[in-house]
Image (tube, rainbow, N blue to C red):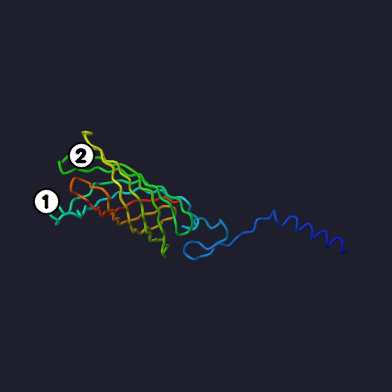
Amino acid sequence: MKRNLWVLILGFLMLAPMVRAEVVEPNEYGRRGRGRNMGYQGPMGDKLHVTFSFGEGAYINAKCGSGYDCDSVMVTPADFELLAGYKLNRWFALDLGLVMAVDFDYYDRVNYMTGLRPGVRFVFPLLFHRSIYLRAALPILFGVSADNDHQTVYIGLLLGIGVEWRFGPLGLFGELDFTPFFVEMYPGYYAIPIQGRIGVAMHF
């Protein structure tokens, strides 16, 4: 009898590592589900996100009022951003945005700007499938006029705050960006773009 009992115990110990335990994990809104069988688990299970957005706003010229003949406020170029991000944990993600913008300069010429926005974001999940995020990026934009007679490199710092509503893996978001540039946007214009942005997001 004892020998049979020891055989059963040893057999159980050998098979135990092969049996996967079903882990109970909290989802993004505090409810608990069993393993992966509960379907969508929200930001805790997401690793990748891809967004597409449209931005528009105004340039604030820091030099106006200091003896310069210029406009203190101008309309910013309409820009489109395609962004991919990777979430390192529940709160922190790395971003890389591709930007395309169309602008008119002070000579009424068409300018095209394109470039990258590498950056980071901090996400703060809320109730009711919402989240607030803070975003920081280093825009590196290349400007080319329509007649290709001049090219400019723009480097700045983007600071933004946004809110996103989630519908499963799909998200809708609005964002406010403040982007001081370290170079003149135009001669005599150290412009600071302030933009509103709306877009859609997919989470994987």
Given the current orientation, which residue lies at the most extreme front position? 67
Q: Position of residue 146 (x, y in %)?
A: 22, 35
Badge 2 crowding class, 10 Å Cα cut-off, few under 14, some 14 to 19, many 20 or more, is some
Write down the quadrant of residue 2 in the picture. bottom right
> Which of the numbered marks, if any, corresponds to residue 92?
none
Q: SS of the residue at dot 2?
A: strand
Q: Earlier in the sequence, mark 1 or mark 2?
A: 1
Question: Is residue 61 shown above or below 28?
Answer: above
Residue beneath the point at 22% across and 51% down: 191
The one of 76 and 183 positioned closer to us in this rendering: 183
**Amino acid type shown at disc 1:** Asp
The x, y position of residue 160, in whole percent, is 33, 57
| Contact, mark 1 vs mark 2 (Cβ under 8 Å) | no
Label count reads 2
Q: Residues within 10 Å of mark 1 (few under 14, many from 20)?
A: few
For numbered disc 1, what is the local secondary structure?
loop
Name the spot of residue 92 as percent of width and height, x first.
44, 57
Q: Residue at x 85, y 60 (%)?
A: 4
Give the Cα separation between the discs numbered 1 and 2. Answer: 22 Å
The residue tagged 1 is: 69
Instruction: Nearest to the eye among marks 1 and 2: give it.
Output: 1
**Residue 110, label in figure:** 2
Callout 2, which amino acid?
Val
* x, y percent for residue 10: 79, 58
Q: Residue at x 30, y 44 (%)?
A: 141
Give the quadrant of the N terminus. bottom right
In the drawing, does residue 161 fall left or right of residue 4?
A: left
Q: Is residue 70 left or right of residue 185?
A: left
Q: In terms of depth relative to the viewer, which is nearer, 128 or 82? A: 82
